[in-house]
């Protein structure tokens, strides 16, 4: 996949994920989604157990594992179906994917250009900061590929 294709893919994902923001709208209820939906439906643990074909004690364990963040996605999907729900699973970036790539490229460029600037100062050939943004953009364009962004901390 070339850089232009990756950029288009990022933009499409950003558009699809935008309706999921702000993410705090989807914070897990204190007792977990399974328990919250079950209670809202007026369904007992025994009734959910029958729908899932598990023991009532297993429902307690299931709800506890969700509350603790240890539940498997497939188990959560089965519980959602038993509750007449659809599990929605997504990774919602804290910023846009396009912004994350841009910020990372800029960080790497600043680091690398900082080394060059330091070396030039040592050689008494210091450059001014006036053209820093232009140098950063040129450096990113000429030296940084998407594949290079995430190889180092």
Image (spheres, grey):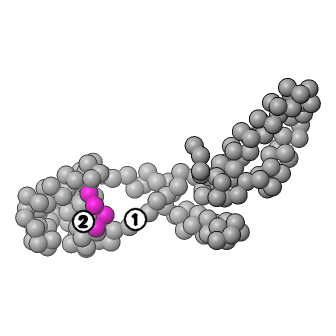
Instruction: Name the magenta segment's main secondary structure.
Output: helix
What residue is disc 1 on? 89
Instruction: Tally the numbered discs.
Output: 2
Q: Quadrant of residue 9?
A: bottom right
Picture residue at 92% right of the left edge, 30% below the top: 125
**Residue 27: image location, x then y, percent:** 37, 52
Q: Is residue 9 left or right of residue 24?
A: right
Q: Secondary structure at mark 2?
A: helix
Q: Quadrant of the N terminus?
A: bottom right
Q: Is residue 22 left or right of residue 39?
A: right
Answer whether residue 21 is magenta in the image: no
**Residue 116: image location, x then y, percent:** 81, 37
Picture residue at 59% right of the left edge, 46% below the top: 152
What residue is disc 2 on? 75
**Residue 62: image location, x then y, percent:** 18, 58
Work out whether 45 lies above or below 52: above
- Which residues, given as a range, are shown in magenta? 71-75
């Amino acid at each position: 996949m070339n850089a232009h294709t990756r950029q288009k893919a990022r933009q499409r994902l950003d558009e699809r994920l935008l309706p999921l923001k702000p993410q705090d709208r989807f914070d897990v209820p204190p007792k977990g989604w399974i328990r919250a939906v079950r209670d809202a439906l007026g369904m007992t643990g025994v009734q959910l157990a029958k729908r899932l074909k598990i023991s009532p004690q297993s429902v307690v364990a299931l709800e506890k594992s969700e509350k603790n963040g240890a539940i498997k996605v497939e188990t959560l999907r089965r519980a959602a179906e038993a509750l007449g729900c659809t599990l929605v699973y997504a990774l919602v970036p804290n910023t846009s994917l396009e912004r994350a790539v841009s910020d990372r490229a800029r960080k790497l460029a600043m680091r690398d250009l900082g080394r060059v600037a330091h070396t030039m100062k040592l050689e008494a050939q210091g450059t001014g900061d006036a053209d820093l943004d232009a140098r950063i953009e040129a450096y990113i364009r000429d030296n940084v590929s998407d594949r290079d962004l995430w190889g180092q901390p």
